[in-house]
C-alpha cells in the first residue's frame, strides 16, 4: 500500500511540473508579444498606470493590452495594485525584457517559441515522412535571427569574440579579405566593415530575402568595402582568397556541412583562420542532461535546425551536433590546428578557432 502512495505522490509532483511547463510556454508567447508591440519598452518608461494609460502610450487597443496584462500579472512579470488598478513593470524585470537592456533582452529570444510553433503542423507531418521542413515555412526567421544576432554576436564581437584570435584586431585594421558564410542579413559584417575600413568583407547566404536586406543596409551606410552574394555556401569559389572566414551559428543548419567546411579550408590562404561560433553542447544526449538550456536547444533543433537541413537533402546534424562531432568534421576538412573557447557571459555557444596553416 505504501508503494502506491509513493507512486501517486511522484505522479502528482510530475503533474505539477507539467502544469508549470504549460504556464511558462504560454508566458513565452506573451513575452514575444510584449516585445513586438513595444509594451515592455513603454511600461519601463511609465510610472504605475492603468491599462487605458498603457494602451494609449503604446498606441494599442486597450482590450488587447488588458488581457495581455492579465497574463503578465498572473505570471509574476508585472505588478498590479488592485486598489488603484494600476500596473507596473519592476526595474529588475525591465532589465531582462526591454530593448534598452540589450544584449540581455530575453524577450528577443522568446520570439523563437511562436516562430517555431508556426511550423508545428509541417514538422508533425515530417515526423512521418522524414523529409524535413523548408525555410519557407518560417516566415519571420530572418527577422528574428537578425535581432538575435544583434545580441549574441554583434554586441560582443569586438570586446569578446574577435579577440579570441590573437592579433586579429591588428590584422583587420591593416586590411584583410574576410568571408562570412550563411551571413543572413549581415549585421556582424556591417559592424566589422564600419570598424575596419581597410578590410574587404563578403557575405554569402542562400536566402535572397536576407541578401537584399544586407545590401540595403550596406548601401544605407555607404560601405564600399562590403558586398553580399546570394549562393550556396557548399560551393565556394576560388583557392586561397580569404584571410578570415567567419561562421556564426551556421554550420549545423547546412545541407552539405562537410562540403562547407572543406570549401572554407580551400578558400583560406595559408595563414588564414576560421572563426566558427556554434552551439555549446555534446554529441551524445547523455552528456547534455545538465545543460541549462538543453530542452530549448533540442526543441529549436527539432523544429528548425535539423528539419531545414533534412528538407534540403542534408544529414540533419541539428543544433546539438556537439563539440565532439564538430571537431571530427573540422579535422576531416583538413583543419589540423583547432582550439575551442567559451565566453563567461555566453552559455549557448562554443567558439572554434581553426588555423589553415
Image (cartoon, grey):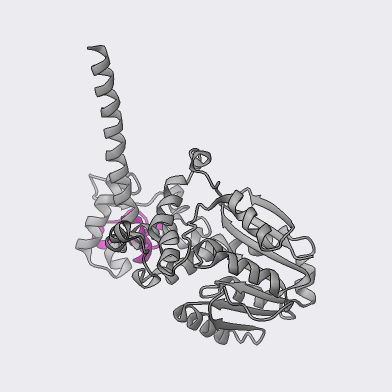
The reply to whether residue 34 is in sight is no
Q: Is-magenta flag for residue 58?
A: no
For this orientation, the residue located farthest to the left is: 63
Span highlighted in magenta in the image:
31-53
Would residue 22 be found to the left or right of residue 243 on screen?
left
Q: In the image, 113: left or right of 9? A: right
Q: Nearer the viewer, residue 50 or 218?
A: 218
Q: Is residue 79 above or below residue 147?
A: above
Q: From what the image shows, is residue 222 above or below residue 189?
A: below
Q: Position of residue 262 (x, y in %)?
A: 65, 68
Q: Quadrant of residue 113?
A: bottom left
For the view shown, which residue lies furthest in the top direction?
Answer: 1
- Residue 66: x and y, percent? 23, 57
Q: Relative to 147, say whether 20 is above or below.
A: above
Near-viewer residue (97 or 345) = 345
Q: Which residue is pictured at 53% across the width and 65% down the height?
A: 149
* Quadrant of the rendering where the C terminus is positioned: bottom right
Q: Residue at x 64, y 63 (%)?
A: 157
**Quadrant (top left, top right, bottom left, bottom right) of the N terminus:** top left
SS assignment for the magenta stretch, majority: helix
Residue 33 x, y percent position in the rendering:
32, 61
Along the line of sight, which residue is nearer the eye, 95 or 147?
147
Q: Is residue 90 visible?
A: yes
Q: What residue lies at 55% left-to-right and 48% top-to-bottom? A: 281
Instruction: Report which quarter residue 107 is drawn in.
Output: bottom left
Amino acid at each position: 500500500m505504501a508503494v502506491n502512495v509513493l507512486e501517486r505522490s511522484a505522479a502528482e509532483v510530475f503533474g505539477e511540473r507539467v502544469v508549470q511547463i504549460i504556464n511558462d510556454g504560454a508566458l513565452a508567447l506573451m513575452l514575444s508579444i510584449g516585445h513586438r508591440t513595444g509594451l515592455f519598452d513603454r511600461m519601463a518608461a511609465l510610472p504605475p498606470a492603468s491599462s487605458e494609460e498603457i494602451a494609449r502610450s503604446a498606441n494599442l487597443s486597450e482590450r488587447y493590452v488588458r488581457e495581455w496584462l492579465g497574463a503578465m500579472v498572473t505570471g509574476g512579470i508585472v505588478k498590479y495594485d488592485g486598489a488603484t488598478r494600476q500596473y507596473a513593470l519592476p526595474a529588475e524585470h525591465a532589465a531582462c525584457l526591454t530593448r534598452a537592456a540589450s544584449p540581455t533582452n530575453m524577450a528577443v529570444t522568446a520570439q523563437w517559441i511562436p516562430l517555431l510553433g508556426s511550423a508545428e503542423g509541417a514538422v508533425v507531418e515530417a515526423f512521418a515522412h522524414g523529409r524535413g521542413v523548408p525555410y519557407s515555412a518560417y516566415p519571420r526567421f530572418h527577422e528574428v535571427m537578425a535581432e538575435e544576432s544583434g545580441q549574441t554576436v554583434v554586441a560582443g564581437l569586438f570586446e569578446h569574440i574577435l579577440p579570441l584570435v590573437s592579433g586579429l584586431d591588428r590584422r583587420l585594421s591593416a586590411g584583410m579579405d574576410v568571408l562570412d558564410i550563411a551571413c543572413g542579413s549581415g549585421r556582424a559584417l556591417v559592424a566589422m566593415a564600419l570598424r575596419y575600413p581597410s578590410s574587404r568583407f563578403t557575405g554569402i547566404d542562400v536566402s535572397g530575402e536576407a541578401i537584399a536586406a544586407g545590401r540595403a543596409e550596406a548601401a544605407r551606410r555607404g560601405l564600399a568595402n562590403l558586398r553580399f552574394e546570394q549562393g550556396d555556401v557548399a560551393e565556394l569559389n576560388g583557392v586561397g582568397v580569404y584571410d578570415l572566414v567567419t561562421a556564426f551559428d551556421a554550420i549545423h543548419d547546412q545541407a552539405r556541412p562537410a562540403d562547407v567546411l572543406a570549401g572554407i579550408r580551400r578558400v583560406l590562404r595559408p595563414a588564414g583562420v576560421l572563426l566558427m561560433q556554434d552551439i555549446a553542447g555534446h554529441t551524445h544526449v547523455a552528456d547534455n542532461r545538465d545543460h541549462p538550456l538543453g530542452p530549448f536547444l533540442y526543441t529549436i533543433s527539432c523544429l528548425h535546425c535539423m528539419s531545414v537541413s533534412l528538407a534540403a537533402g542534408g544529414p540533419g546534424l541539428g543544433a546539438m551536433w556537439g563539440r565532439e562531432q564538430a571537431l571530427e568534421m573540422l579535422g576531416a576538412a583538413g583543419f589540423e590546428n583547432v582550439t575551442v573557447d567559451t565566453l563567461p557571459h555566453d552559455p549557448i555557444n562554443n567558439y572554434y578557432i581553426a588555423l589553415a596553416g
